[in-house]
Image: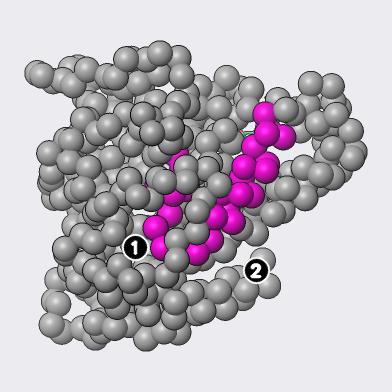
């Protein structure tokens, strides 16, 4: 773990330099580094014009939310070293408590917008992905789902989909806009940050992270969302829950038609939902985009062949408490670190779905190959995420 962290800090320092030089002139096409073609969704980055040049790119959400912008030292050009430490606003805002800072950061990053405003959503994705304190607050994957008053605030009582935290801010949290109303309160042993929220209900279907309209209940949960609850134990983020109104509001947006397709292509043959592709979730200039796409494309057919996707799919057919979706690229990042250790475990019982078995991983050789592919995915994902971590600090 320590070695890995050290490696990541090196990557961060190196990447920060690359990002700094590329982001000085974000409006200058020629100055941008090459964008590797991802293995899946080759032209998807081009479909995100807003990511290239939001005019407000001088805005830094960390400083923008500071209550005393002039007083603290957050430099326009942050120093190159240890950006992860630098972006933590704690030193700049000692007077704002942690949970309040989290709420303010989220609210500032995704302000009210029309429900079909794709560009506003893209701008929010970028800002949310820089909220270091929020993204670093979960222990590993961040469980996400919907609140139920009769179940209460304990995340362990829910069946929740796990996301890599940065990916969650970009693909899920950005689906909501925030007016500013919020509370921080204790609920038993938990601290709950409740942020009034409104769902972006009219985005193109492929811009959602999966067909959230696959049941009417699922769509209703999203479209009736009134608030996002962030459930903490101290400063550790345990889960994020949408809180929905029990009944339909007037003029409630109807869901896209559910045709049973979890994946599809748009008119130009690009894979959909693009909201679950790496090209959508990572920044356009991320130099690891091609590598992580290639690694997932090599791994995915094996996951399919060994029946992993029969359970690890958004319909949660395994009824797992901790739901892991491996069938979409971005969702699979939730377990990029736990996949290899699981496949290497020696103590799996014969009836464990992850043990060698017919209808699963057939034999030792197949397992070894799967481990090799999973290791390649882990390494590429780690590099791609490290790049985004470094990117938080600049611009
Ligand atoms: C019969 C259903 C089923 C099948 C088939 C299955 N899994 Fe799982 N998997 C589960 C359940 C259930 C869990 C535990 C979730 C939990 O903790 O509640 C799990 C956990 C995992 C985790 C750990 C996720 C974490 O929490 O970090 C990984 C990784 C994983 N599975 C990968 C695979 C792979 C790879 C395959 C195919 C070889 C596979 N699974 C096949 C049901 C299944």
- Residue sitting at x 51%, y 79%: 14
Q: Nearer the viewer, residue 163 or 306?
A: 306
- Residue sitting at x 46%, y 19%: 261
Q: Nearer the viewer, residue 270 or 197?
A: 270
Quarter holding ligand 1: top right
Q: Which mark is residue 130?
A: 1
* Residue 69: image location, x then y, percent: 14, 77
As for residue 294 lying within the magenta part, the answer is yes
Quarter holding the C terminus? bottom left
Q: Quick one: SS at disc 2?
A: helix
- Residue sitting at x 74%, y 44%: 342
User: Quadrant of residue 343 in the image?
Assistant: top right
Question: Is residue 92 visible to us here?
Answer: yes
Question: Is residue 241 visible to us here?
Answer: no
- Residue sitting at x 22%, y 30%: 201
* Residue 387: image location, x then y, percent: 48, 66
Q: Which residue is mark 2?
A: 4
* Residue 238: image location, x then y, percent: 45, 47
Pointer 1 local density, CA inside 10 Å: few below 14, some 14–19, many at least 20:
many
Mark 2 touches mark 1? (CB < 8 Å): no
Q: Residue furthest right?
A: 364
In this rendering, the answer to whether 3 lies above or below 267 is below
**Which is more N-terminal, label 1 or label 2?**
2
Q: Which residues are magenta?
A: 276-304
As for residue 142 lying within the magenta part, the answer is no
Pointer 2 local density, CA inside 10 Å: few below 14, some 14–19, many at least 20:
few
In this rendering, the answer to whether 261 lies above or below 392 is above
């Amino acid at each position: 773990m320590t070695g890995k962290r050290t490696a990541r800090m090196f990557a961060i320092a190196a990447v920060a330099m690359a990002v700094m030089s590329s982001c000085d002139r974000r409006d200058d096409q020629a100055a941008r580094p090459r964008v590797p073609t991802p293995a899946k969704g080759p032209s998807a980055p081009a479909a995100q014009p807003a990511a290239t040049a939001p005019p407000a790119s001088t805005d830094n959400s960390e400083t923008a939310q500071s209550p005393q912008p002039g007083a603290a030292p957050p430099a326009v050009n942050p120093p190159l070293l240890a950006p992860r430490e630098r972006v933590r606003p704690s030193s700049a805002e000692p007077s704002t408590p942690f949970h309040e800072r989290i709420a303010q950061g989220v609210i500032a990053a995704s302000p009210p917008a029309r429900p079909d405003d794709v560009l506003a959503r893209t701008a929010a994705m970028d800002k949310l992905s820089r909220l270091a304190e929020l993204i670093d607050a979960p222990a590993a994957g961040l469980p996400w789902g919907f609140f139920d008053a009769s179940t209460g605030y304990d995340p362990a009582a829910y069946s929740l989909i796990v996301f890599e935290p940065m990916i969650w801010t970009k693909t899920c949290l950005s689906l909501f806009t925030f007016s500013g109303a919020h509370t921080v309160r204790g609920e038993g042993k938990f601290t709950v940050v409740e942020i009034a929220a409104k769902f972006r209900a009219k985005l193109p279907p492929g811009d959602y992270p999966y067909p959230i309209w696959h049941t009417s209940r699922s769509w209703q949960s999203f479209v009736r969302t009134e608030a996002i609850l962030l459930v903490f134990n101290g400063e550790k983020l345990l889960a994020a829950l949408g809180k929905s109104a029990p009944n339909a509001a007037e003029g409630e947006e109807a869901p896209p038609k559910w045709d049973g397709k979890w994946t599809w292509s748009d008119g130009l043959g690009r894979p959909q939902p693009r909201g679950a592709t790496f090209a959508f979730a990572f920044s356009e200039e991320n130099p690891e985009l091609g590598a992580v796409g290639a690694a997932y494309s090599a791994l995915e057919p094996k996951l399919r062949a060994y029946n992993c996707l029969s359970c690890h799919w958004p319909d949660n057919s395994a009824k797992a408490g901790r739901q892991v979706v491996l069938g979409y690229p971005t969702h699979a990042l939730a377990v990029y670190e736990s996949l290899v250790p699981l496949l290497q475990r020696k103590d799996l019982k014969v009836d464990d779905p992850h043990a060698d078995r017919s209808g699963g991983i057939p034999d030792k050789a197949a397992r070894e190959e799967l481990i090799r592919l999973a290791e390649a995915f882990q390494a590429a994902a780690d590099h791609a995420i490290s790049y985004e971590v470094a990117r938080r600090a600049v611009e």
